[in-house]
Amino acid sequence: MLAAFAALCLGCGGTQATGSDLDLRLAREAYASGYFLEAETAYERYLQADPHGRHRLEAWTRLVEICSGVKGDPDKAVSLLETATLEYGSRPKENWALLFRLGELYEVRGQRQKAIEAWGRCLDTADGDAEKIVHVQMRMAVANRAIGKSDLAVDLLTQSIAQAEDQEVRARARYELAQTYALSWNWAKAKEILQKVLSEETTPAETKVMSAFLLAEAYEVEHNLPKARELLLSIKDSYPNPEVIVMRLSGLGQHNESPSVAKLQPGDADMQNAGSANVKRRRVSAK
């Protein structure tokens, strides 16, 4: 099929390419046309044929995209990235994105400690870029929180709040810090932070919604059910999964044994997963 695609490309006119140049051209044409398996083969041939090619970063990146997003093979994607990060070890500017993606894929596979290590290497390649540093620290904080290292998560998020230049990112970091305190049952600190997040006009709408949801949990723990109900009703039309709000309202005051904290990862545009996770937790608690 790759040979047929090559013949089709060559028959379309334009300058003739040979060797690694031809492999790169075929890979790009195949990728743009949605022939991802053919693109994968051509990119692999390009990497083999040109060890010092100018477009190797493109080839590595596309191969990872194909393996993780098209073929659903995160194991191979991780293997590719591990090799690519070694190749770009002396080029921190290019290596940062590779290391960050490697951390994401480790996290997808449930290897959070390895994800934290990869993101730690990201910090070494950030070259003082505050935006990159904060982005990485927030991901590291959430991963550390997930493995029970709440104190480290608090430190990383506190640093992120101080370093964040973008006000929306700072608000997201505050939300994550509040969530970390909530999971440690330090509701006083969580409430203080959440109220600040909700009071700031620059807070993104999605962060305000999730903050209101978590603040309602704090009021429920304090047995201030009218205030909890008020907050839940205020987000009933904006929360990504309305079923969650319905269930929370119907079970208000009955689930104080553990916090049902919504999980919103830094940078997530879609909060549907957060809502679904809460629905599942509530159903388990009700049984």
Image (cartoon, rainbow, N blue to C red):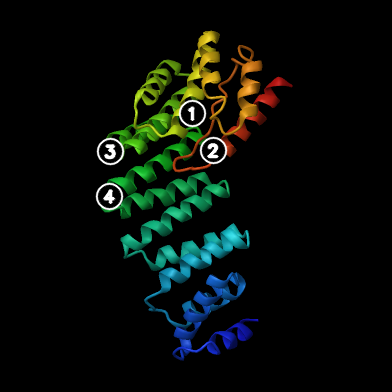
Judge whether residue 118 can be spotted in this image.
Answer: yes
Q: CA distance from mark 4 to mark 2?
A: 28 Å
As helix, strand or loop, the secondary structure at mark 1 comes to helix
Judge whether residue 151 can be spotted in this image.
Answer: no
Amino acid type at image mark 4: Asp
The answer to whether the residues at label 3 and label 1 have Cβ atoms under 8 Å apart is no
Residue 198: which quarter of the image?
top left
Which of marks 1 and 3 precedes in the sequence? Answer: 3
Q: Please rate how many residues cluster around mark 3, counting C-alpha atoms within 10 Å: few if below 14, some from 14 to 19, many from 20.
A: some
Residue 189: which quarter of the image?
top left
As helix, strand or loop, the secondary structure at mark 2 comes to loop
Q: CA distance from mark 3 to mark 2?
A: 25 Å
Q: Residue at x 37, y 42 (%)?
A: 137
The answer to whether the residues at label 1 and label 2 have Cβ atoms under 8 Å apart is yes
Q: CA distance from mark 1 to mark 2?
A: 10 Å
Which of marks 2 and 4 precedes in the sequence? Answer: 4
- The residue carrying mark 1 is 209
Relative to 29, is 136 on the left or the right? left
Which of marks 1 and 4 precedes in the sequence? Answer: 4
Relative to 284, is 11 on the left or the right? left
4 vs 2, front mark: 2
Q: CA distance from mark 3 to mark 1?
A: 24 Å
- The residue carrying mark 4 is 129
As helix, strand or loop, the secondary structure at mark 3 comes to helix
Which of marks 2 and 1 precedes in the sequence? Answer: 1
Q: Residue at x 44, y 40 (%)?
A: 266
